[in-house]
Amino acid sequence: MSWLAPVVLGLLHVLYRLVLVLKSIFHSGEEPQALLSERSKLPSHLALALVANPEADAEANEQYMLNSVEQVAGWCHAVGIRRITVYDREGVLAKCSLELRERLMPPLRREEVEEPSKECDIQYPPTPPPSDDAESRPLSPQSGASVPKLAVTTLRFPHNPSKPKRRLSVTGAALKRRRMTHTDVKPEEPPLTLHIISYQSGKPAIAAAAKTILQDLRQSSMNGTSPPSLPSLQELNTILEGEHGFPSPDLMIVHCKPPVSQLRPPVELGGFPPWQTRLTEIYSDPYPPAREVPSIREVEFRRALDEFARAEMRLGK
């Protein structure tokens, strides 16, 4: 009878796999709210972790990532999310930052402005010093503070205002100008901020930031300007989430390039910077498409927003 237990266990595993496959094929899922529906809360900062398909070629994975970022940026603009962080482990998106800039540049600004660099602020990671061993460089010759290599590329896109209609009647335009007051002017929307990160922005960046703080403390101690002390978590947080890093996202969508196996492994972040995910709500579609699609689908984005709206944030209380 010793053989009976393994046989029964094997049958249970086969039955469980069959149930998962059938459920993923025929499960339609609850229809999420429309994109512009009012939700109880929205994330102010959304992260998109894109996972390449190992069975696809490099060009297909690159186009999938670029299309997904373009789609998500448009949806975020529609619902009012003004900060996005996009991540891929191999740094494909960081290499394509110029193409992303062209794709996300507001079309009216692209037509009207002769110097695009003024309309899209691209902030690249600090250039490393000539020494291969150095992990940071001084902010300025007069400053003793250093900036570690955080490998974060930041792009900022201005709001795309609608083109004003030209009036043929001079009298009508003059009347409108006379009636117009300062209260009629709407405040300009904040720019869309896009952070592009990779694996190098995670654990390697934390190590570089800690090493930079220790080097600064050691230098200050040797100069006699301050007594030796240990770096604080606040100092580390200021570097990693400050001007040269990126803040913690409220919601992260983990998306794998379809087609995805119906018996996929558990959700993995693939080396996403752990420092910024302490309080992040993580979403991954439990029933991804089994067919080829060019990018993340709007229905998945809407489901993620619905999940975030229903989540209860206790923040350790």
Image: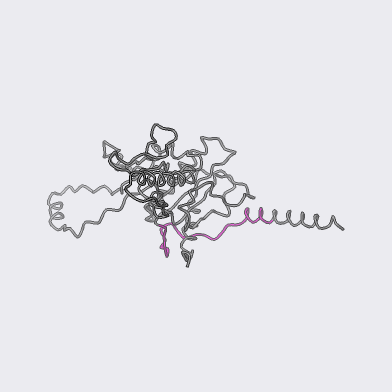
> In this picture, is 314 found above or below 162?
below
Q: Residue at x 47, y 66 (%)?
A: 314
Question: Does 56 sit left or right of 44 as displayed?
Answer: right
- In the rendered image, residue 75, in percent from the top left (x then y), is placed at 41, 51
Which residue occupies the foreground of this view, 95 or 310?
95
- In the rendered image, residue 98, in percent from the top left (x then y), is placed at 38, 37
Residue found at the very far right of the displayed protein: 1
Q: Is residue 192 magenta?
A: no
Which residue occupies the foreground of this view, 296 or 246?
246
Question: Magenta residues: mostly which secondary structure?
Answer: loop
Q: Is residue 31 magenta?
A: yes
Q: Residue at x 52, y 48 (%)?
A: 255
Question: Does 172 sit left or right of 92 as displayed?
Answer: left
Residue range (magenta): 19-43
- In the rendered image, residue 130, in percent from the top left (x then y), is placed at 39, 31
Which residue occupies the foreground of this view, 166 or 181?
181
> In this picture, is 141 found above or below 279?
above
